[in-house]
Amino acid sequence: MNLYRKVPPALVYKAQTAIFLVAIACHGTVAAQNRSSSTAPTLVPVATGLVNPWAVAFLPEGQFLVTERPGRMRVVSASGQVGPALAGVPPVATGGQGGLLDVITDADFARNRRIYFCFSEPAGAGATGNSTALARATLATDGRSLQEVRVIFSQQPKVSSSLHFGCRIVQAPDGNLFMTLGERYQRMSDAQKLDNHHGKVVRISPDGAIPPDNPFRSRAGALPEIWSYGHRNPQGATLSPDGKLWTHEHGPQGGDEINLPQAGRNYGWPVVTFGENYGGGKIGEGTAKAGMEPPLHTWVPSIAPSGMAFLTSTRYGAAWQGSLFVGSLKFGTLHRLEMDGAGKVLREEKLLEGSGERLRDVRQGPDGLLYLVTDSPQGRLMRLQPGG
């Protein structure tokens, strides 16, 4: 697949899509800095009373599609009215970090009303365990139910764990789907093996088929859906302006990473990491090893990243255009990363300090503004409003 061709205009409709990154010259250090934006943006509530919302996607006429981790999906009106739970959501294994997680709309949603969503899928009757699954469905024209629901991928093997599901979805310019998968915490060594889906990024077609150019499709003993491996718990994914896949993942105690997963590459976990065991103690062999890709950027200490999006618009001023935005669950901060033309992080700015809200998702809407969801039993969908 060619990830570098021009992104079709239809993909501008999606939060993670069609981005025009500009080279931002600066003379600061790579170290994180705090500095105020001249636009002085403020958070404006769009909808409240959501129960642990996990992701937001954008529908026509200013509506939103929001997932709640306990297993519900809702349409939110342009005026912020939260609709009833949609019928048709499959059984979800809830508890811990598990539940109904990411959702995106298809690039051609205006015509086919198709969505993709991932969730913690329970094992079948008589079996135990769970895993991350990816489903496709059609949103009914009345916005009250999901129709033609079909699971097109199930992470293997299923294990008894309530941790590290990963579960961000990105649709590439060619229509194929990337999904990030956690290593389920206690199975971290699986991230270095190709006979399972733990700690992987996978790539499938919209109907669940294996693309012919997947890197491990023809390797004996390897699962053909695998795109890259050696990941821990990736909970952020988006496309760069030239169509490249960007992800971030949780480190253990420290060592959160931003990566650019490429076909067939190994990203090191748990052999190399910038983090350490909870409570202290070395993990693996160090921070680098031949044959393992280094991260583009790390956070030590950890910020617990979740959600990420490039800003394509100038709604917040030209200085912010092309920046990468990442939410923090740990600190409730929104991190703005400035890059040069080669993708190197030049400067980091922390926004929304002191908000006290866990930021679960970050997306750019069709109006060019950033939208956030907060992970709490009284979660909110919010808009980052430019200053006057």
Image: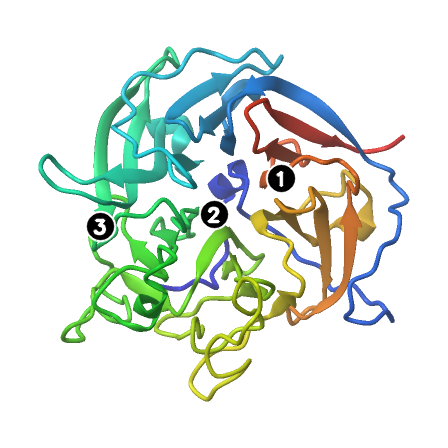
Determine the residue positioned at 21% across, 34% down.
150
Q: Which x, y percent locates residue 180?
A: 40, 54
Q: Quadrant of residue 229?
A: bottom left
Disc 3 and disc 1 in contact, CB within 8 angstroms: no
What kind of element bears circle 1? strand
Q: Is residue 163 left or right of residue 41?
A: left
User: Does 353 sit left or right of 227 as displayed?
Assistant: right
Q: In front here: 343 or 155?
A: 155
Q: CA distance from mark 2 to mark 1?
A: 30 Å
Q: Which residue is mark 2?
A: 8
Mark 3 Cα-neighbour bin, 10 Å: few <14, some 14–19, many ≥20 = many
Crowding at dot 1, Cα within 10 Å, few <14 / some 14-19 / many 20+, comes out as many
Residue type at mark 2? Pro
Label pair 2/3, CB-CB below 8 angstroms: no
Q: Quadrant of residue 281?
A: bottom right
Residue type marked 3: Lys
Distance, label 2 to label 3, CA atoms, is 36 Å
Nearer to us in this view, 104 or 7: 104
Q: What is the x, y in percent for residue 209?
A: 20, 52
* Residue at image point 53% right, 82% down: 286
Between disc 2 and disc 3, the foreground one is: 3
Dot 3 or dot 1: first in sequence order is 3
Classify 254 as above or below 129.
below
**Numbered label attached to residue 359:** 1
Q: Which residue is mark 3?
A: 158
Q: Nearer the viewer, mark 3 or mark 1?
A: 3
